[in-house]
Image (tube, grey):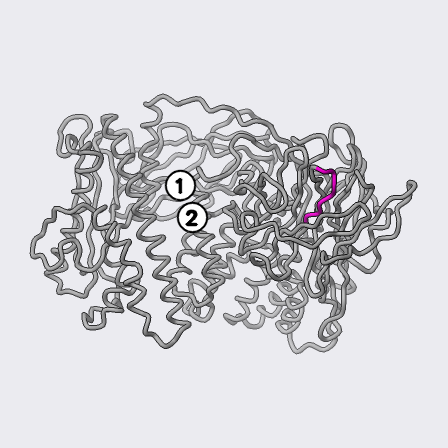
Amino acid sequence: MKQRLLLLLAVLMLASPMAVAQSSHESEGDASFAAGLYKQALDYYKKAARSHRSPDLIYKMAEASRMANNYTKAIDYYKEIATSINRVDYPDCFYYLGMMYKCNGQVDSAAHWINRYLSSLPDNKALMDRARQESRACEWILDKEGNHQKDIVYGVIHESKNINTANSESGAVLVGDSLLLFSSIQEFSSVTGKNAIDFDLVLMQVYESPVTINGKAAPSVLNNWGINHKESHSGNVAVDSRNSTIYFTRSIVGKGKNNQYNTITSSIYCIRQKKGKWQKAQKLGGDINMDGYTSTQPAVAYLEDGSTILYFSSNRPQGQGGFDIWYSVISPDGTPSKVVNAGPIVNTPGDEITPFYCNECQRLYFSSDWHFGYGGQDVFYSLGSRDQWQEPVNLGPSLNSPANDIYFTVNEGSPNKGYFTSNRRGSYFISDNTCCNDIYRWNSKPAPVKKEEPVKEHVVTMKGAVHSLLPISLYFHNDTPDPKSELFTTKQTYFQTYNRYMFMRQQYKNAFSSMKDTVARDSILNEVDYFFDHDVHDNCVAFEKFINLLIDDLKAGKRVNITVEGYASPVHNSKYNQKISQRRVGSIVNQLMEYDHGRLKPYLGSKGEGSLRISEVAYGSSRAKEGVSADGRNTAQSVYSVDASRERRIEILDYTYLEDDSTKISCLNIPVRASNIGTFDREKVDIQVRIPHTSLNEATLDFISVGSPDAQVISYSKLTPRRDLVVYLRLDFRKSDPTPQSFLPLTIRVKGEQVTQTMFLEYSVK
């Protein structure tokens, strides 16, 4: 993890001499990986794979790809393991596969694999805590209404090749209004010939580039103020203009095992200007730099009394976890005060890096991989100073990407302009289009005020909103509602059973308290917590949203059919389980009828506009998962285990409109209005279009086509019950002219239906 952070911090990828005597390409790859040379390691592993392709080697290729930010390759390799019989030997594979999907912008797939990891009873507590957070983050992304900046939108400009190269550039900061300082890492290879494997990036140095009034940067040159050092990484510049001081990071490289250069120690230095000349660089005193730990990425702010405060990132002890943001007050003579942690509102168990303080707006900008974000590292801001902060706010999807977004800075005197660093798609690269960091320029403006849409338009999209919640699984304690009842019906509502169920969490935990294997016990207890927090609670919240959307549909005159299925665990006999599952379905129907003083009752069975039909199916325990305990004497497994608990549920599976419309495909909810898919740069991009499949039966596409020379259908998923149809499109706008608005017609026909229907995808090219 530290080595991956060093890559993000641009204190990374130091080349080591080629090993003289290696037994195989795989062992050479292992050595490169240990030295932090992930691209080089992957190249060696690929060579080894030509002669043998073991699961261990595939997993090493996945790990090297992940550490090198090669998301697409990492997905391929992790998925090869995750879908094989060898997956049990690689317990963290599901989580990392999910994270690579997230960093690749495929959030649905990310949520699937991360939740699958959580349901596998992992024994890595730290990784499980992170997986829980990432699962919630995926929900936050899909919800589209999370805590992110909504009043401001950002325009993003990729800096030219005067600044960016195929290597990594980072940490741009504008000095005054006409000089840009930034860091760049240069490529190096000491081996030539057709079989040579390029070494990774070697030495980071600070460059400068004059900037015109409209923000364009001239060709860059190496800075000569005394920041750079020919044998050390130098970068992460912060300017204290009031005191004519520049702070920066210097990383001294030392030899590790086998005489390889893989030991990196980062510390914060400064240079001061006297009589127009820069003095010799000095390492900061006090406890800002701590032996054995990294201190990096300084940021300058000013307190109300005019004194200087220095924020920076460090992985030192006594923090919240990983890299945290810390601060120290610098006295007029340059002496730093004792270092203080910025506190738990900003810092998390994850990594908070690249701080920048905007004095004009009183905001601390920073990047985090723990707070809810769209990708790996996202940019956030928090109002306040020192260790008194308001809740961090994500800058939103107009700036943050699925990749890593770091080193956000604001131009002095221009709070609506600045720079940041990202390895997003479109960055220049050596081996993969997300491998390397580039510098981007941003500008901001107030978000346009959204006009309220007419009620009719809201109703047209309502079905899609409901389908985004499905399927909803609602859970019950053993033999509820109405224990030991022989009736098929109940008078209880689901919310009544839910409230009692949520208070039983400790009872479920106590069932495993006598386990002697503490590691296994802790894993089970964590899984119980996850089940109550995620499965039970979150699905109940979704159910209430579902009811309110259903009410809106019925008020608008829709004729709706919903399908509800009931299940039971196998601990009782099959005949009794049939009764339990029917009572569970009945509690859902009761809840619908009693919700909000019976607002839905007039619609049930109505034959006019605004009618509700409920299709009820009770399966009992006939579809219980194989292996779930039916031993009533061992209640820990048959009653209180999470596997058994997940069988005691009902599912709301299907939501259809009962309308006779021969112009529509019956099993697909194709929107009648154009769907906006976004604004794109003139480049090649892959997107997914999701269309709800509303039938409980399998179907097959007979025809699909996109009517535009700028697009092609790459593939599409099966028409599977309870799963969206996913159409994968490749858009190529490299030859397109900028357009304010365009439409892609996507035409679909399903086998067995005589209807051909077209949906329109709205987009613009900038």
| Position of residue 594 in the picture relative to residue 277 (left or right) | left
Residue 501 position within the rendered picture, expressed as x and y whole percent measured from the top left: 25, 54
Under tag 2, what secondary structure? helix
Q: Nearer the viewer, residue 483 or 223?
A: 483
Q: Nearer the viewer, residue 504 or 461?
A: 504
Q: Is residue 542 magenta?
A: no
Is the C-beta separation of discs 2 and 1 under 8 Å? yes
Residue that appears at 18% across and 38% down? 594
Q: Residue furthest left?
A: 486
Residue that appears at 13% across and 29% down? 607
| Position of residue 478 in the picture relative to residue 515 (left or right) | left
Above or below: residue 326 compared with residue 624: above
Under tag 1, what secondary structure? strand
Tally the marks.
Answer: 2
Q: Which residues are magenta?
A: 305-311
Above or below: residue 204 compared with residue 637: above
- The part of the image, by quadrant, that contains residue 65 is bottom right
- Residue 108 is labelled as 2
Q: Residues within 10 Å of mark 2 (few under 14, many from 20)?
A: some
Residue that appears at 79% across and 39% down? 241
- Residue 690 is labelled as 1
| Position of residue 319 in the picture relative to residue 18 (left or right) | left
Residue that appears at 56% across and 58% down? 321
Above or below: residue 658 compared with residue 337: above
Q: Nearer the viewer, residue 683 or 246?
A: 246
Identify the amino acid type marked 2.
Asp
Q: Nearer the viewer, residue 229 or 595?
A: 595
Residue 456 position within the rendered picture, expressed as x and y whole percent measured from the top left: 32, 23
Q: Is residue 308 magenta?
A: yes
- The part of the image, by quadrant, that contains residue 255 is bottom right
